[in-house]
Image (cartoon, grey):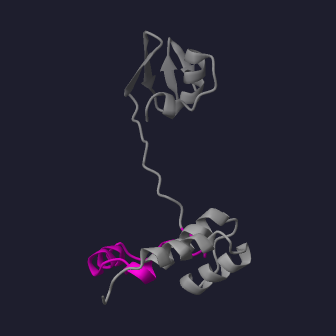
Amino acid sequence: MIGAIDHDLIAEKLSAITQLSRKDLVERWTSTNKRPPPKGISRRILEYSAAYQVQVKACGGLSPTIRRKLRRKGPSRHKSSSAPPFPRKSKLIYPGTRLVRDWHGRTYTVEVMENAFQYNNETYGSLSKVAHAITGARWSGPRFFGL
C-alpha cells in the first residue's frame, strides 16, 4: 500500500535514538536546524528533536496552514543562536488593588501600594515578605497570592 506508515520501523528508529552519543545527537540537530544547538541543552531535548525528525520523515511535517500561521508570527527578535525564552505573562498589579488569600481558615487581605504592599498595618517591600509574614515559611509571594 502506497503511503502506509510502518509503525514498527518508526518504533525501531525511535528506540535507536537513545543509543546515540551526545556528539551524534548534536550533529543531527546541527544538520536539521542548520546551526548548533543552544549551549547547555539537555540530552533529553536533543533526543526529542531527533525523535520528532524521525516522525516528520515517516508521517509528514506540519500542515501548510500551521506553517503559514507560524510564519505570520514573524521572525524571532532574538539574535542569539539559541531559542528565545518563553514569553512571561505580564503580572502587573496596580496600586489600590486588594489581594485576598484564604490560608488555614483565615482570610488575609493585602493592599497594593505604589512601590510596596500593606498588610496588617505594616508595609512590606515585596509580596514574598508578606507571604512569609503570613505563613512563617519562604514562599514566592506572587505564587502564594495566585498571580
Q: Looking at the image, can residue 115 be seen?
A: no
Quadrant position of residue 64: bottom left
Q: Is residue 147 above or below residue 3?
A: above
For this rendering, which residue is in front, 15 or 92?
Answer: 15
Q: Is residue 103 above or below residue 94?
A: above
As for residue 114 lying within the magenta part, the answer is: no
- Horizontal relation, residue 111 to residue 42: left or right: left
User: Which residue lies at the image location 69% right of the left edge and 80% below the top edge?
Assistant: 24
- Horizontal relation, residue 10 to residue 138: left or right: left
The boundaries of the magenta stretch are 56-83
Q: Quadrant of the N terminus?
A: bottom left
For this rendering, which residue is in front, 22 or 69?
Answer: 22
Quadrant position of residue 33: bottom right
Q: Is residue 69 above or below residue 109?
A: below
> Residue 60: where, in percent of width, then height?
37, 81
Q: Is residue 89 above or below residue 147?
A: below
For this rendering, which residue is in front, 5 or 102?
Answer: 5
> Residue 135: where, in percent of width, then height?
57, 17
> Residue 31: where, in percent of width, then height?
59, 86
For this rendering, which residue is in front, 117 or 131?
Answer: 131
Q: Looking at the image, can residue 22 be seen?
A: yes
